[in-house]
Image (spheres, rainbow, N blue to C red):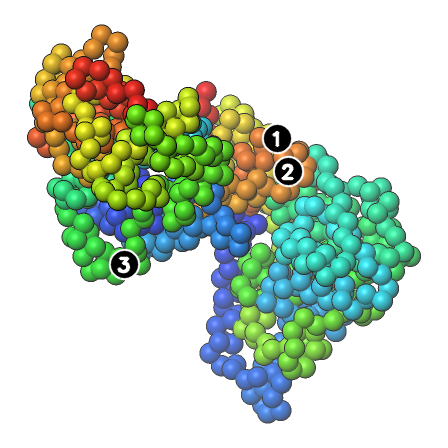
């Protein structure tokens, strides 16, 4: 049975070309970019080249790109790094209830250190409200962190409006753009973004690398101590092969942005239409008109996440849910709980399907058939 | 019959050595094996550590060694409703419940079996020491060959319809062999200690655990003729035949629990292991399950166990009109305990069982037992 990957928001397969870009680096470039000899320079060249591409992809300056080990570290650095460096300006941080745990758990850690954190609510359409943000802002606010696209629902947040709102406020604006990057045009200066998180493995690049854009005027402390790498913001010998692969992945993403957007949107439609044609009862979580092409989150009334995901996997469908269900505990999705309330069954019967380069029209159609079959079977059993 | 390759077997995996080896054997026999970890109880401690997480981790490691898929499923709600509620109710009624029997009946071989079937399984397998045999068109349950490990006592409430869908890959081997296989294959669970006690209590102090759910009402310890011998901590903490923890000093033979008076909150105690008050000659059982009802006659002789790991005793069973059974012992029995299971055997075949309800001696119910 053909295994069909529908979980590109979790991670993506590496592009063939990315691998091709990395192999010679693994083979021939082992130098330390900080070294003063030719071996080091060769490595440094690759790193600089990658940084240039990262910067161009979001219309930033090369100096504003800090490589990290990935999205989580970039979120941590943005959040904690600015909070600690700007304590003299205030003690208040605003974020949202639907952030990735890389942000939420950092916020909780800061609360323990005495910061006040406001968690903006999210509504049934999957978005936060600007009014709420405006009300929450105070003179003490030093940081606002709102994700660009939610990783569970795919709903795009009003980033441009937030940027405008914060234009004349001291608070820095951070956005986790891990799910947005590669499918949405991001112009950090025009959008008023001070910090932005990107991860390589979500865009068909290698794992273990990401970057944080930090605008020139942002005051930020390092969270690690060591050498002078990454302008002292992120010490440690750099991941050169990773940077080479990440660079290729970003180039491909920029080249194919429109094509991929159209493709993934078509896959999503095809998938949903297939379910409809099979008479499957489901609901889309969040306003589908505001969703990124690659992600759709569906609730299957009468089913539950555990059975759905287990059955999907046994039938060769790889999908996931925001409800953690390891070791037999179903923790309802914090995002869907925020949108619909903790007693709404959709918090434990919803599945995220996310499309990407693994998919083709054929395998999406096939996936839709298999999912329909399973949902039919499971909801029948429960009736 | 499908070939093994096309036969899907869901193995209930606990993270222990038995279910690990059960999965291994099935995999070696070429079945399409799927490992599933079941969580029935949340025991997260004050450090946020949960044994379920650690056990699941072992399941993951074993399944990866065996190269089989693994998943988990949560039955906390069903377990609470069907097993734990019964467990507390029985204690409240002054009896000594057997949650493992109930867990097998309601969870492992009902809710979990349904779940397995919803995953397209042909069979559900567990690491229990018992055997399933098809003979004369009937599906029977036999004792595990390891006398010391036989678990049919806990499985007495299964029906032949359920057993048809069940495999016990360890039933034909001794525990030592199971450990040996685990070691030979380098399974990470090879040396893992067997779990002891009731699953949701684990290694914790039983008294402390129970006191979190049921208020303890201390009262008098008396002999049957009314002489007060001391204080008990709450009737639920004692079981018939118990010697430990009574704290009655003085000379002479040690003291034993012989009964409970729920109404007056009195624990009855008498002196001497072989005290007459501990003995009875028959019992009445309820909640009867016959694995193959058609082989059960109105009156028949067989052997029975009144508690786990006890040697069989010869009995005569008489079905009553009210659905209960009257069980007469060939020789008088010591410390029969209401709430425990009585399980019947015809040689190696487990016939079924029920719950001990009334204890009888010389045609009179021993009301003092409780």
The residue nearer to you, when weighing A356 against A213, is A213
Q: Position of residue B85 (x, y in %)?
A: 44, 28
**Cα distance in 3D space between marks 3 and 2:** 42 Å
For the C terminus of chain B, give its image quadrant.
top left
Label 2: chain?
A
Mark 2: give few (<14), some (14-19) or many (20+) Cα within 10 Å.
many
Quarter holding residue A271 = top right
Question: Which callout, 3 or 2, points to the residue nearer the camera?
Answer: 3
Question: Does A121 appear above or below B361?
Answer: below
Q: Position of residue B262 (x, y in %)?
A: 40, 24
Label 3: chain?
B
Task: Name the N-terminal-most of marks 2 and 1.
Answer: 2
Mark 3: give few (<14), some (14-19) or many (20+) Cα within 10 Å.
some
The residue nearer to you, when weighing A230 against B58, is B58
Left or right of A307 in this view: A8 = right
Quarter holding residue B108 = top left
Q: Residue at x 63, y 38 (%)?
A: A336
Label 1: chain?
A
Q: Secondary structure at mark 1?
A: loop
Question: Does A112 appear above or below B76?
Answer: below
**Cα distance in 3D space between marks 1 and 3:** 44 Å
Q: Residue at x 18, y 57 (%)?
A: B180
Q: Residue at x 75, y 73 (%)?
A: A63
Q: Position of residue A383 (x, y in %)?
A: 46, 20
Mark 3, residue position: B191
Q: Residue at x 69, y 65 (%)?
A: A77
Q: Position of residue A6 (x, y in %)?
A: 50, 45
The residue nearer to you, when weighing A374 against B326, is B326
Mark 2, residue position: A337
Mark 1, residue position: A344
For the N terminus of chain B, give its image quadrant.
top left
Q: Secondary structure at mark 2?
A: helix
């Amino acid at each position: 049975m053909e295994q069909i990957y529908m979980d590109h928001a979790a991670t993506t397969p590496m592009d063939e070309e990315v691998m091709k870009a990395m192999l010679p680096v693994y083979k021939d470039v082992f130098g330390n970019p900080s070294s003063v000899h030719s071996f080091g320079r060769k490595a440094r060249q690759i790193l600089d080249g990658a940084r240039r591409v990262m910067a161009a992809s979001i219309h930033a300056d090369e100096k504003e790109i800090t490589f990290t080990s990935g999205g989580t570290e970039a979120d941590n650095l943005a959040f904690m790094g600015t909070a600690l460096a700007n304590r003299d300006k205030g003690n208040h941080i605003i974020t949202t209830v639907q952030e990735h745990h890389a942000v939420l758990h950092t916020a909780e850690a800061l609360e323990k250190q005495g910061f006040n954190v406001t968690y903006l609510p999210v509504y049934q359409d999957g978005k936060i409200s600007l009014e709420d943000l405006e009300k929450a802002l105070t003179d003490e606010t030093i940081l606002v962190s709102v994700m660009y696209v939610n990783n569970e629902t795919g709903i795009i947040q009003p980033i441009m409006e937030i940027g405008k709102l914060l234009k004349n406020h001291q608070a820095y604006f951070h956005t986790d753009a891990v799910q947005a990057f590669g499918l949405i045009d991001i112009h950090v200066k025009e959008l008023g973004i001070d910090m932005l998180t990107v991860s390589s493995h979500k865009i068909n690049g290698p794992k273990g690398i990401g970057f944080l854009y930090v605008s020139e005027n942002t005051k930020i402390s390092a969270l690690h101590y060591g050498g002078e790498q990454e302008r002292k913001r992120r010490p440690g010998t750099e991941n050169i092969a990773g940077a080479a692969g990440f660079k290729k992945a970003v180039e491909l993403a920029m080249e194919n942005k429109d094509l991929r957007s159209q493709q993934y949107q078509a896959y999503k439609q095809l998938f949903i239409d297939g379910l409809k044609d099979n008479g499957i009862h489901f609901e889309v979580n969040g306003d589908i008109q505001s969703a990124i092409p690659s992600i759709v989150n569906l609730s299957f009334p009468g089913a539950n996440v555990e059975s759905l995901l287990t059955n999907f996997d046994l039938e060769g469908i790889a999908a996931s849910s925001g409800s953690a269900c390891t070791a037999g505990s179903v923790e309802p999705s914090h995002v869907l709980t925020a949108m619909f309330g903790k007693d709404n069954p959709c918090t434990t019967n919803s599945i995220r399907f996310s499309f990407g380069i693994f998919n083709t029209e054929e395998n999406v159609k096939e996936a839709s058939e298999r999912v329909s079959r399973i949902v039919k079977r499971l909801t029948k059993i429960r009736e | 019959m499908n070939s093994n390759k096309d036969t899907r077997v869901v193995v209930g995996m606990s993270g222990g050595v038995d279910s690990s080896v059960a999965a291994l054997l099935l995999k070696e026999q070429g079945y399409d094996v799927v490992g599933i970890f079941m969580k029935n109880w949340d025991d997260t401690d004050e450090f946020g550590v949960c044994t379920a997480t650690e056990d699941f981790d072992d399941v993951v490691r074993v399944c990866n060694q065996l190269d089989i898929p693994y998943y988990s499923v949560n039955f906390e709600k069903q377990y609470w409703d069907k097993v734990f509620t019964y467990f507390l109710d029985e204690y409240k009624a002054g009896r000594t419940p057997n949650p493992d029997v109930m867990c097998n009946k309601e969870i492992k071989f009902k809710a979990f079996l349904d779940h397995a079937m919803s995953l397209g399984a042909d069979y559900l397998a567990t690491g229990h020491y018992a055997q399933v045999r098809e003979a004369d068109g009937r599906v029977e349950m036999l004792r595990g060959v390891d006398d010391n490990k036989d678990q049919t006592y806990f499985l007495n409430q299964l029906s032949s319809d359920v057993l048809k869908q069940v495999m016990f890959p360890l039933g034909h081997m001794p525990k030592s062999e199971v450990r040996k296989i685990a070691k030979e294959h380098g399974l990470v669970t090879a040396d893992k200690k067997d779990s002891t006690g009731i699953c949701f209590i684990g290694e914790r102090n039983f008294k402390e655990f129970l006191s979190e759910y049921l208020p303890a009402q201390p009262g008098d310890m008396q002999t049957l003729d009314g002489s007060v011998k001391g204080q008990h901590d709450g009737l639920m903490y004692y079981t018939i035949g118990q010697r430990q923890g009574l704290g009655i000093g003085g000379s002479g033979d040690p003291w034993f629990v012989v009964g409970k008076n729920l109404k007056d909150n009195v624990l009855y105690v008498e002196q001497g292991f072989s005290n007459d008050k501990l003995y009875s000659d028959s019992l009445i059982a309820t909640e009867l399950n016959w694995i193959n009802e058609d082989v059960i006659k109105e009156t028949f002789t067989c052997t029975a166990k009144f508690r786990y790991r006890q040697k069989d005793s010869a009995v005569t069973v008489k079905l009553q009109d009210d659905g209960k059974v009257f069980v007469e012992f060939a020789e008088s029995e010591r410390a029969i305990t209401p709430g425990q299971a009585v399980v019947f055997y015809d040689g190696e075949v487990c016939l079924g069982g029920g719950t001990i309800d009334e204890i009888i001696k010389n045609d009179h119910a021993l009301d003092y037992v409780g």
